[in-house]
Amino acid sequence: MTPDEIKSAITGWSNQGTALQLVEDRSEPGADFVLGLRTSTHGSVGTIPVEVRLDQGSDRVTVTSTSTSTASQGDIRSLLDTRPGGVHGDNSSGGTVITGHVYTDGFSKHALIRTVAEVAKTRALVDGLAGTGAGAGLASGGDLGQGLPTAAAVQETPAWSPAAQPAQ
């Protein structure tokens, strides 16, 4: 897909039965496009801002959201280590930048929505570590945090074994 086709697809999917809302379309040097979106995340309060950009000549669309959580760097790193492999976090002077990517080869609505959702969920969880922001309440048992295993629980999970079969 061309950069124009990708941008057109994203703007078309926004507000079309998805959790995405287009709030900004801007130009930046070195970028084919930069879109400001807001997305609602299950269990969060309000919506989470995310930026979707395609840099000129890049083979992937970058999805980012920045948390200004006051939680310790160790707590943030521990949380980030439990998130899916496609989501990364880096500390900067402005906070923790949560990043995910969608490759332009095979670009699809599902891939974009999934990446935006994972970035937004991670941002909400980081915000929730300090009990502030869009993720408030999640770290203390909000809907989003429930059902997610801890690293210790994953390591303690026994190996898979087949279920007992009924007698015939």
Image (spheres, rainbow, N blue to C red):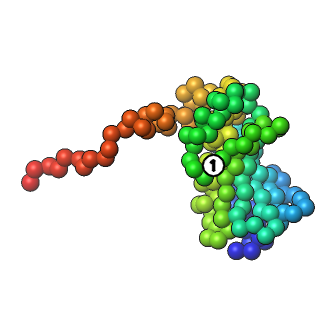
- Which percent across, then down, holds residue 81? 58, 40
Quadrant housing residue 145: top right
- Which percent across, then down, holds residue 14? 71, 57
Q: Is residue 119 above or below residue 152?
A: below
**Nearest to the observer: residue 59 or residue 34:** 59
Q: Amino acid under label 1?
A: Val
Quarter that holds the N terminus: bottom right
Q: Tell me what residue is drawn at x 14 percent, y 49 percent.
A: 166
Quadrant housing residue 3: bottom right
Using residue 135 as the reference point, say whether residue 4 is left or right of it. right
Furthest residue in direction bottom, as rendered = 2
Using residue 38 as the reference point, say whether residue 166 is left or right of it. left
- Which percent across, then down, holds residue 130? 69, 25
Q: On the image, numbered disc 1 is attached to which residue?
A: 87
Q: Tell me what residue is drawn at x 55 percent, y 40 percent.
A: 82
- Which percent across, then down, holds residue 9? 71, 67
Pointer 1 local density, CA inside 10 Å: few below 14, some 14–19, many at least 20: many
Quarter that holds the C terminus: bottom left
